[in-house]
Every structure is written in C-alpha cells, then in structure tokens.
Image (tube, coloured by chain):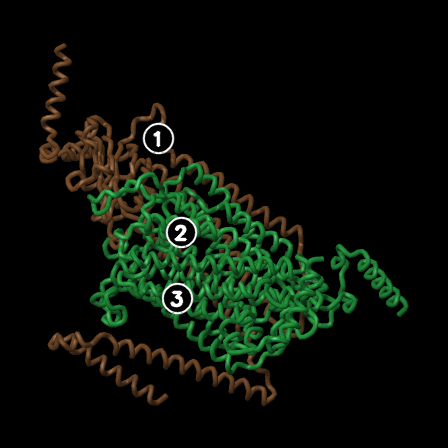
Amino acid sequence: MLSALAVFMLLGTSMAIAQATADGGAAATDAVKDNGMATAGYYTLLFLIVCFVVGIVGKILRVFDLTQQIQGKKAINWNNVMGVVCIIFLVAGMYGAYWEYTVQGSMILPAAASLHGVKIDTMFWTTTVLTTIVFVITQVLLFTFLFKYRYSAKRRGHFLPHNNTIEKVWTIAPAIVLTILVIFGFFTWQEITTSVDAKGEPASINIDVTGHQFAWELRYEGKDGKLGNTNYKLVSGINKLGINYKDPKSFDDLQADTMVIPVRKSIRLNIHAQDVIHSVYMPHFRVQLNAVPGLPTYFKFTPTITTSEMRTKLDNPTFEYLLYCNKICGGAHYNMKKVVRVVSEAEYQAWLAQQKPYLTDKLKQDLKFADQKSAVSQNNRLALNN
Amino acid sequence: MSTLAVHDHAVAHHEGDHGHHKATFLNTYVFSMDHKMIAKQFLITGISMAVIAMMLSILFRIQLAYPETSFPLMETLLGRFAPGGRLDSNFYLSLVTIHGTIMVFFVLTAGLSGTFANLLIPLQIGARDMASPFMNMLSYWFFLTASIIMLSSFMVEKGPASGGWTIYPPLSALPKAMPGSGMGMTLWLISMVFFIASSLMGGINYVSTVLNMRTKGMDLWKMPLTIWALFLTAVLGVLAFPVLVAGVVLLVFDRSFGTSFYLSDIVLNGSQVQPFEGGSPILFQHLFWFLGHPEVYIVIMPAMGISSEVMSVNSRKPIFGYHAMVYSLIGITVLSFIVWGHHMFVTGMNPFLGGVFMITTLIIAVPSAVKTFNWLATLWRGNIRFTAAMLFAIGMVSFFISGGLTGIFLGNAALDINLHDTYFVVAHFHLVMGSAAIFGMLAGVYHWFPKMFGRMMDERLGFLHFWLTFIGAYLVFFPMHFMGLDGVPRRYYAFTEFESMKQWLSVNVFITWAAIMSALAQVAFLFNFIHSIFWGKKATQNPWQANTLEWTTPVEHLHGNWPGEIPTVYRWSYDYSKPGAEEDFIPQTVPFSQTMSSNLPHDFEDNPIGLEEHAKWTSTQKRNEEVK
C-alpha cells in the first residue's frame, strides 16, 4: 500500500515535469519521448487506490457488522439499505430525466421546415407525451414497489399467481393505443412516400443527388424542365455522373455546388449512388432516404422556411440547412456535407440563371460534340426546308 | 411416453459411464462433454469477449470525446491504427464494427444462451445431460474458433472489418471501398460461418433436450420461464441463423468469385466502372435482417426468462401471469419473424412494405408491454430480498422499459425517417437489448454462480457493481436520445466538421467519462467472479430457497447431475409464499399429498382425482373445526 503511494507520487511528479517541459517547448525531444505512459500510470495508480479504498471500506463495514452482532445488536440490514437506495435513485433519476428533457431537449432540431415534416412533428410530440407518461408511471411503480415491499422477516409475499381481468386490461389498453399510433403513422407514411406528382399538381422541381465517396453531386434540370438520362458505364474523368449526351434532354442540365431550392415549391430528389450505399439526410426538413447503387430512389418534399427566416428564428446568423450522409460509407463518412439554401422564387431563378451546364465547351470538344450538334441542327433545317 | 423412455436410457447410460470413463484433466476441463463444464466454458469465453469489446468501445469513446487531442499512448498501443496518437478514421469504424459484432453475437448470443441454456436446461427439466453431449462440445469449440478468428483480424495489415456490424454491401463487398473490406472482412465472414455452425449445434441440442428429456411430471406448463425462454430462443436461432449463412455465402461469392448478387451499377473512385450488373444491395439487407431482427430477441429473451425467475424467487412470490408470460414469449417468437423490414424503412425498400412492417412492429410491442406489467405485478406485495441477482433483474426491467418505449418511435415508419441511423437508435438498442440483456446475463451469473462453482459471490461487491453499472449505463445512453433528436448520425468519426454538432462535444465528454466509470465498475465484477471461484464462501444446496430442480442436485458436481434417480416433478416452480404452507417456498419435487394445508382447487385443474381428494380434505378440516 505504502509502496503504491510512493510510486503514485513519483509518477505524479514525473508527469508534472514532463508537462512542464512540454509546456515550455524547450525540449521537443522530451515531449516526443513522453508517450503518455506516465499519465496512464498515474491514472492506473489512482484507480488502484480507489480500489484499495473500496476494499478498506468493505472491511470496515464487515468489522462494524461483526461487532454489532457480537454486541447483540442488529447487523446492517442490506434489504433496507437497498430499498432506500432505490428510492434515492428514483428521485434523482426522475430529476435527471427532467433536467435532460429541459436542457438537452432544447438543443434538438427546430420545428420542421417542410410541409410533411410538420405532420411528423405532431406525431413525434404525441408519441413523446404518451411514452413519457408510461415511462414515469412504470419506473415510479418499479422503484416504489422495491422500497415498499422490501424484505421483512415478519411477513410473507402475497400469493397472487394471476388475475385474468387485469391481464386482459393491460393487454388491450396498449393494443388500442398502438393501433391509434399505427393508423396515424401508416397514413402519414403513405402520404410522405408518394413521390410521383399527382394529376393537376404543378410539376415538382427535379434535382439529381448523386453520392460517391465522399461527396455529393447535384444536377438541376435546365430550361426544358427535364433531366437527361445517365448510365454508369459512361462515367469517366470528364463525365463524372455518366450523363448520356446522346439524350437531348441532357444538354441543358446544370451543375451546382449548393442545393438552392425555392421555398414552398415541391422538390423531388432523384437519389443515386455510384459506389456504396449513402444516405441523403436533411434533418431540418425531416428528409432521409438511402442512395443505393443500381436502385434510384425518390423523395418529394416542400420546404416552407427560407434560410434567412430560419436564421432570424434561431437567432443564428450563420445558420445553414445541411444535407449529409447518414449511412456508413467509408473512412470520410463523417464529412460528406452539402449546404442547402432555401430562397424565394425570384432569388432561385436568379441563382439558376448563373449555373453552368454539365455540357461544357471542353466536354463538347472532347466528345466531338459540336459537329454532331451542328449536324443535328442542319438536319432540322433541312427538315424545315422540306 | 417418450419422456419415460429417454429418461430410462439416460440412467442406464449414466451408470455405464462410471465403468469405462477415466476423468482426466483433458476430458474434464478442456474437451468436456458435461453440460455444466461447457456452460462454464461459454461463460468465461463470453466474459472475456465482453471485456475486449468493452475496451474497444472505450477507445472509440475517447475519440468521440476528444476528437482533436492526440494521445501518444494510443500510438504506442495501436501503432499504425492511431498515427500521431489519434485514431485513424477507418480504424474508428473497425472498432465500432467489431464492438457491435462481438457484443451482439459473441457475448449476448453465445455467451448468454450458451451459458444458461447449457447450465439450466438439463438441471431445470431434470435430465442427466444434453441430448447430444458431443455436439454440445463441438458447439463450444466452434464458438471458440470463431472468437479467435474474429479477434485475429486485428493482426491483419489493413485492420478488421469496418463496414458496421450489419456489413451492408457494396461497402463490405468491394475491397477497394475501404481498408477493412479486404482481408479483415474475409476473416469476419469466416468467423461468422463458424459462429453460426456453433449456434445451430447448440440450438438443435437445446430444442431436442427440452422436448424429449424432461423428467417425469415435468410437462411443458410446469417448466420454469427460464426454460421456456431458452427453448424459444433456440427455436428462433435454428430458424433464423441459416438465412444469415445464405446471405454470408452470397457475399463471399460476390467478393471472391465475381458474382453480382448484391452489386450493380458501380463506379469506384469516380472513373473505374465495375463489371457488376443486375444485383441488389437491398437483397442483402433483407437476408441480414431476417436473421438480424429475430437476433435481437435471441439476445433479450433469455434475459427475460432469467429475470422472471430471479424476480420471482427474490420477491418470494409466484411470477404474475405465468401463462401470459409464456404466451407473450411465444407471441414475440412468432412476430419477430415478420418485423425485419423496420430496419429498412428508408433504405429504398418499397414504401408500401414499410407500412406493413410498421403495423407488425407495433403489434410486437403488445406482448412486450404485457411482460413488463407482469413483472411489476410480480413485485407488488412481494417480500423483496435484494440479492445482487435481484438488483440486476430489476435493472433489466428498468432498461427494458426505457429502451422499449423509444422503440415506439423507431417502429413508426414516418418518425423513423428522421431518426434512422442517428444516436437515437444507438440509445434505443443499447438500452433495450444491450444493457437489458447484459443485466439479465449478470443476474443469471450472480444467481447461478453457486450452482456453477459451488461457492457464493460477494453480495456487497455485487451491490457496488450493480449501482455503478446501472447509473453509468443510464448516464451513457440517456443523453444520446437527444443527440439523435438533433439529427446527429451514428458512426461519425468526429463531430468537429459540422458547426451544428459541436454543441454536443461537451455531452460527448460526459458520456465518455460515464462509460469509463461503468467500464471500471466491471473490475468489481471480475474480481468478485474470479476471487469467488477459488475463495468464495461455500454454497449450500439451495442458497436462495428456490423451487426449481437444479437446487435439488448436490453442490459438488457430478456427471449425470443427480446421484440416484432423477426426481419427479409434481407442481409448477412458482409456489412461493403459498398460504398455509410451512415455509415460503415449496420445491417442485414436493407432491401435493405432503402439502394438504396449502393446496388450492386451482392446483388440480386437470386432475379430477386430486381435486376429489382435496375437496375431501378441506371438508374434513371444516368438520374438525366445527367440532372444536
């Protein structure tokens, strides 16, 4: 024990010295040599001392217990001790849960910034209220029962093997509550996942989102309001999305660094992945869908709050909506972000006008595209002449 | 009929044993075919794996708490995996992956079921050993081989598998996609094939033993809930694990033989077009979760069974609603096969399927709720003895409630959109299946330690262990819910790249220290466990005054469990505090004729002669009283 203390102090001082030298920055070599062994040793010894203290306390308790017994007094009643600890835990735990609900609960995402997100939020809060009630009731019952019915040699447990009425009640009650939640959830889910524009609805703005290790590529439809075909076999250094330039719809497809979207317009994300599974996650809009290689997926949503409105609302002038990857995809999975900016329709049109098409002049040259295109246009002219 | 025949056979075999078997060190401790020794082997291997997986979690917790700090010691320990004293981001993912794999499969499946099914099935149903002791031994050795292969992947140059414990292809199928998908992934797959073989051999054994080798009088409705739980778990495992083998084998084909079961339309590094066509990554997810979801019940059901038993014994009360408990276990078993899609709501699976899986998922909450209420009713008006085992069983219930309730959020497809793969999920399953199952397992260890090693564990050290772990686990996982609600994704190496996630750094530091505290608390357990094996207080035959059969065996182990004939069973195992009985427990081996004063009409439901006798006895009693 004493020797342990000695080593502890020794290590402590050597660590202090090591820190001092490192702080001074005078001897860089010393700092390199210090690989943290001293610190680790310090903490290990600290832990050993804690163990010793626990052991000693244990011994003291046992001695106390034995002397009590020798003197004919009652030994420590561990059932009472544990019963009381249960109640303390219940009170402290309930306060802790309350603290977390209020303090950390205020750090969670702001209210949804999309149409369907509002419905999700309503359902979320309903579920939260219901589960919190059940959580509090069951935990309170659990720990108060433990305290109230702690062991006493004077009595026996109440022989109660079953009670069919109450069992039926607590089978049916959760079943009813869950049925309500299921029906609520089922229809909301059906509504959210309908990604095709219904008849009579204004057409959604299509945006292609393609994930690859470790970034997102965006493609906006040009003036024709349509995206061109893609084929993974066409992917190359100069055509990173594998756009099929034989498809005339692709000529005006635009590339963008930021996902700028107009507020209160339906947006349809066409989600692709090139290498492994990624996931398009835009938590503020309650949008998430995996990007799967070989299986395009679609998510339709309507943003309702512009970035600048959100900045005022959150009192955070640098706030940005984000799109990030939420399916493990490799070493830099944690850093696949894309800024999303919700703007007014006018701003959106102005921004869109500035975006460059994927079909750059250089690409046209490389694909000997100019000739083809002029040939096409000549053909057209011929056709017109006829 | 069959019960009797097998029973006789077992006796004959047992008597023959002593003639030609010589107990050597090798066949007693190493290649033992005795179910009690195999249980201990599973337990000790499981605990070792748990300690390793726990240390891995502390390593990545340190990374999450101090993403910018360099720990030179880490470089000393981990070398190229932590250049400059900071974890490599790929190795971080390896740690997460192997932590999950070991905990789910090696600790909570093999460690939990392997230990307690082996120990308790023969002892609690009254059998001399498992149906196939040799296969039982093989099951352990396959498990050990699997463990060694899994750990050996740390020795591979590019590190262990790192695609998450769910190993979704294409990430796991393309060695170029990340370093861990090379040799590390190959070892992971080989290890899992061994593991599944082990699990199947065990499972078939458990099922056949329970069905065929029960002692006289032990009909299914007299079995303790532990046996019900372990039996249904084994059924689940036998039905679900083969599907994972199918998934794994196809993945091996895709990786090594150029097939495209799971792969299609892949371009690596922005320009290398791969030749795969026509496969579907979603197919793997279906195969994986068809096992994966029953797997979480494989993990939790034994813990439920153990907790039910321990809570009943220590509340000195029968388990409330025994039949409801069994039916809810059966309900969970059946339903667990039709809910796997709730892991795939946002993976691109047909949304209509998502809706269907949501309905089935929320239905499974009903039997879970019934179990919870029944446990609470078991405690109500009990006479609760706080043994260490009892505390852990209570902890299991508390975690199961807390974690189960958040399942209602995640099982709702619409809510899952925003919660999928966030820390909310991490918090949910660590509470409901991680902490709850490990607490069930620890309850079992404390409770049956005297049966396994013939000595008692130190109760007070058990109290310390319980409270530190219980509080620690809540401190670790409760705050994670709120991170998830803020849209913080799981499996992120660092939260420093996102301005919005930086607010959680201080919480991460707190969680890490809570995790370190709970990890250190396990030292109390390990010390207690090892110390008690050799120097613990000698156990008596029935230290907890329990009713089940295992406490009728002698403290000193013997091959064949009971020295003479196997005892006959007359009653269910929950006659605690029965009014009119002399003591507050009546072992299953006591016939009703010896307990006339405590018999109830209910005890003779399928036994008209007994009921008549009972009626006769009560009327005589009444007459005698009138005479007085």
Chain identity of mark 2: B
Residue in the image at 26% along x and 69% along y: B74
Q: In this view, does B194 lie above or below A355?
A: below
The answer to whether A352 appears left or right of A141 in the picture is left
Pick the quarter of the image with the N terminus of chain A. Answer: bottom left
Q: Residues within 10 Å of mark 1 (few under 14, many from 20)?
A: few
Farthest-out residue, front? B20
In terms of depth relative to the viewer, which is nearer, B354 or B337?
B337
How far apart in space, not on screen, are marks 3 and 1 (Cα)? Answer: 51 Å
Mark in front: 1 vs 2: 2
| Rendered shade, chain B | green
Q: What element carries label 2?
A: helix
How far apart in space, not on screen, are marks 2 and 3 (Cα)? Answer: 19 Å
The answer to whether A201 appears left or right of A144 in the picture is left
Q: Are dots 1 and 2 on a single chain?
A: no
Pick the quarter of the image with the C terminus of chain A. Answer: top left
According to the picture, the residue beneath numbered tag 2 turns out to be B248
Residue A18 horizontal/vertical position (percent):
19, 79
In terms of depth relative to the viewer, which is nearer, A21 or A74?
A21
According to the picture, the residue beneath numbered tag 3 turns out to be B148
Q: Is residue B241 above or below residue A24?
A: above
Farthest-out residue, top? A386
The answer to whether B351 appears left or right of B378 in the picture is left
| Rendered shade, chain A | brown
Residue in the image at 23% along x and 83% along y: A13
Q: Are dots 2 and 3 on a single chain?
A: yes
According to the picture, the residue beneath numbered tag 1 turns out to be A196
